[in-house]
Image: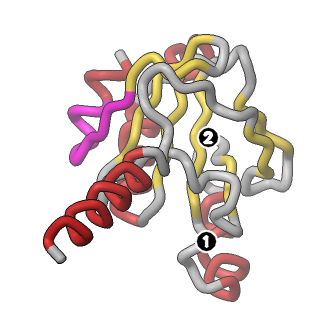
Amino acid sequence: MRTLLFVICTLLTSFAQASSYAEGDLVSQIQLQDQFENEITVSEGTQTLLFSRNMKGGDIIKEALEVLTAEQKQASDKLVYVADISGMPSLIAKFVAIPQMKDLPFSMALDREGETTRLLPSEKDQATLIKLDHLKVMSVSTFDSSAALIKALR
């Protein structure tokens, strides 16, 4: 019985580890619409991918991107922010959240279904920073504060 339990746990752990991108993996190209319904693409030219799967992670990224100057934002044209908003009730997203997102000084690629971003790594209540080189994951970092994320982006 213990052997069977061990095998099951090992398989589940292996599956869980393989369930998100890690350093060295190739990320599939991502195409989503932003809050203005413009197409945003994570492609071979993307060097920095910011990702949030929850409200707290999104707040961390929002605060960090708002702090960056216009000059830094122009230099960061290889940066893409992707947010999984599939956990948000669709009526709230449509009538409250997305209209508020239109006031932000940056674009966010929105995954409304959660399927496109299911393999992107994330931690509860944290923002994810993925460094890419021609869609190859060079590093994955998570941040629990905007100050730490700002430091990493500079």
Q: Position of residue 144 (x, y in %)?
A: 22, 47
The reply, left or right, for residue 10 in relation to residue 136 is: left
Q: How many marks?
A: 2
Q: Secondary structure at mark 2?
A: loop
Give the residue drawn at x 22%, y 44%: 145
Q: Position of residue 138 (x, y in %)?
A: 45, 16
Q: Is residue 47 above or below residue 108?
A: above
Q: Which residues are magenta?
A: 140-149
Examine the structure image and report whether residue 39 is included in the region drawn in magenta.
no
Amino acid on which the number 2 mark rests in the picture: Phe
Residue picked out by circle 2: 106
Q: Is residue 122 above or below residue 143?
A: below
Say whether marks 1 and 2 touch (CB < 8 Å). no
**In this view of the protein, can residue 12 be seen by the observer?**
yes
Residues 39 and 86: in front is 86
Give the residue drawn at x 26%, y 23%: 151
Q: Position of residue 87 (x, y in %)?
A: 54, 76
Q: Position of residue 21 (x, y in %)?
A: 50, 37
Residues 71 and 45: in front is 45
Give the residue drawn at x 60%, y 66%: 100
Residues 6 and 21: in front is 6
Residue picked out by circle 1: 86
Q: Residues within 10 Å of mark 1 (few under 14, many from 20)?
A: some
